[in-house]
Amino acid sequence: MSESLKDLAKTIKDDEERQGILLVAKALVQPLIQIASNAGYNGEFILEQVKQTQKEKGGVQWGFDARTGKIVDLYDSDIIDSARAVRCAIENSLSVARSFLTISGVVRDRIRVKAGL
């Protein structure tokens, strides 16, 4: 999906809209990178492997199985998020982003800032 959004962004003339589309495309791959990193793999490398496999074998059903460390057909491996879960995650993250854009500042916990979190 993120590659499709990048292709769409190339057709958009408005710079702000194009940047928004590219931001969403970047956000869509972050869960894969984080899952791979949490499993002890290089997330960026796994992302590139998944993209290459999707191009070679055709289809977006190819992804990373963190249990085995392999690129697999997610449907055959029963690793599928429901459309509702994905939609809700995107809507919630966009809601937070919209809040940050419409206010002039963000309040953070001072203890976390000192700890570098």
Image (cartoon, grey):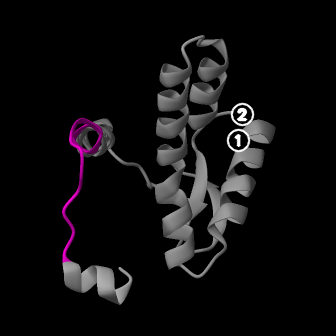
Residue 67 visible from this viewpoint? no
Quarter of image, res 22: top right
Using the image as rendered, state which of residue 21 and residue 111 is in the foreground: 111
* Residue displayed at 57% across by 36% down: 2
- Helix, strand or loop at label 1? It is helix
Please state if 79 lies on the left or on the right of 43 as rendered.
left
Measuring from the top left, give residue 76's x and y in whole percent: 53, 50
Image quadrant holding the C terminus, namely: bottom left
The residue depicted at 72 percent of the width and 64 percent of the height is 45
Q: How many badges with numbers are in the image?
A: 2
In percent of width and height, residue 116 lies at: 38, 83
Crowd class of label 2 (few under 14; some 14 to 19; many from 20; radius 10 Å) = few
- Residue 95, placed above or below residue 110: above
Q: Quadrant of residue 26?
A: top right
Determine if the magenta segment contains residue 92: no
Magenta-highlighted residues: 98-109
Q: Secondary structure at mark 2?
A: loop
> Which amino acid, mark 2?
Gly
Residue 87's place in the image compared with 112, above or below, is: above
Look at 53% across and 30% down and name the residue there. Answer: 19
Tag of residue 58 = 2
Q: Is residue 24 above or below residue 6?
A: below
As drawn, the residue found furthest toward the front would be 104
Say what amino acid the circle numbered 1 marks. Answer: Gln
Q: Residue at x 24, y 45 (%)?
A: 104
In this figure, which residue is indicated by the disc labeled 1? 54
Whether pointer 1 and pointer 2 mark residues with C-beta atoms closer than 8 Å, the reply is yes
In the displayed image of the protein, which residue is found farthest to the bottom? 115
| Left or right: residue 22 compared with residue 102 | right
